[in-house]
Image (spheres, rainbow, N blue to C red):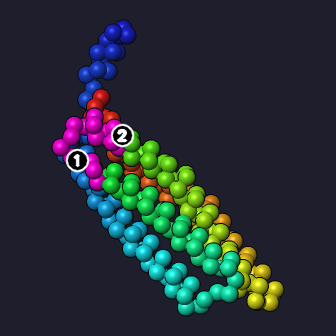
Amino acid sequence: MSTLDLKNLWQQQPTNQPKIEEVLKKAKAYKKKSTQNIIVQNITGVGIIAYLLFIAFYYDPDLLLAKLGIGCAILAVIIYTVSQNKLYFLINDIGFDTNSMAYLEKLKEIKNRQRRIQTTTTSSYFLLFSLGLGLYMYEYLLALQPNYSIPIAIVTLAWLAVNWFYFRPRAIKKQTAKIDELIQYFSSIES
């Protein structure tokens, strides 16, 4: 068998390109899931801000550091929510009537924006919220005896570490996998 025969045989193999209906179904499901996620995130963000304001006014901390801590935490939630809403508007702006190449370009733009949010915004959120929590807890940890305040501080730091090193990477991986799957489907249609 010559190399020419192998080439012809290879080209005659059927390809497993996804059907356009299947791809559109996945794209619509992604858009719907994104809408649901942004609604939950906005409700959660408003709830967190309301709770932090309740703590600030009901418990009325004595030290300025505690008030600054609450302010940092509220600012962190606002920054994260605004950035997620911008991403949502970009996702929601995609029309299914556009050609697949334009849709693919929009998906790549969404992926780039998502990557920026995952690196810069999420890190800023986490650092600001952790700083706020630390500043707020400082006043109350000083009031406790060391045999109570030290374990509380250690548990809080451990929880922050678990969130940063375990939950955050998992969430990023999950979000990236969803958008990569759509990009792969649309890329296979174009080729």
At 50% across and 48% down in the image, what residue appears? 116
Is mark 2 in CB contact (under 8 Å) with mark 1? no
What range of the chain is rendered magenta? Answer: 92-107
Q: Is residue 141 above or below residue 130?
A: below
Task: Pinpoint residue 59: horizontal percent, then vertical percent.
Answer: 59, 90
Q: Nearer the viewer, residue 53 or 171?
A: 53
For badge 1, the amino acid type reads Gly
Rendering quarter of residue 130: bottom right
Asked whether 81 or 72 is in front, the reply is: 72
The residue identified by callout 1 is 95
Q: Is residue 156 above or below residue 179?
A: below
Crowd band around label 1 with a 10 angstrom C-alpha radius: few (<14), some (14–19), many (20+)? few
Tell whether 4 sits left or right of 62: left
- Residue at x-position 50% and y-position 68%: 77
Give how far across and how far down residue 103 sits, in percent: 28, 41
Q: How many marks?
A: 2
Q: Secondary structure at mark 1?
A: loop
Q: Is residue 41 visible?
A: yes
Query: Could you say where residue 166 lies in the image, as x and y percent from the top left?
Result: 59, 62
| Residue that protrudes farthest toward the front in the picture | 64
Q: Residue furthest right?
A: 146
Q: Quadrant of the N terminus?
A: top left
Amino acid type assigned to the residue bearing label 2 in the image: Gln
Residue at horizontal 28 percent and vertical 31 percent from the top? 190
Q: Comparing marks 2 and 1, which lies closer to the viewer?
A: 1
Query: What residue is disc 2 on?
Result: 184
Residues under labels 2 and 1: Cα distance? 18 Å
- Side of 110 relative to 61 (left or right): left
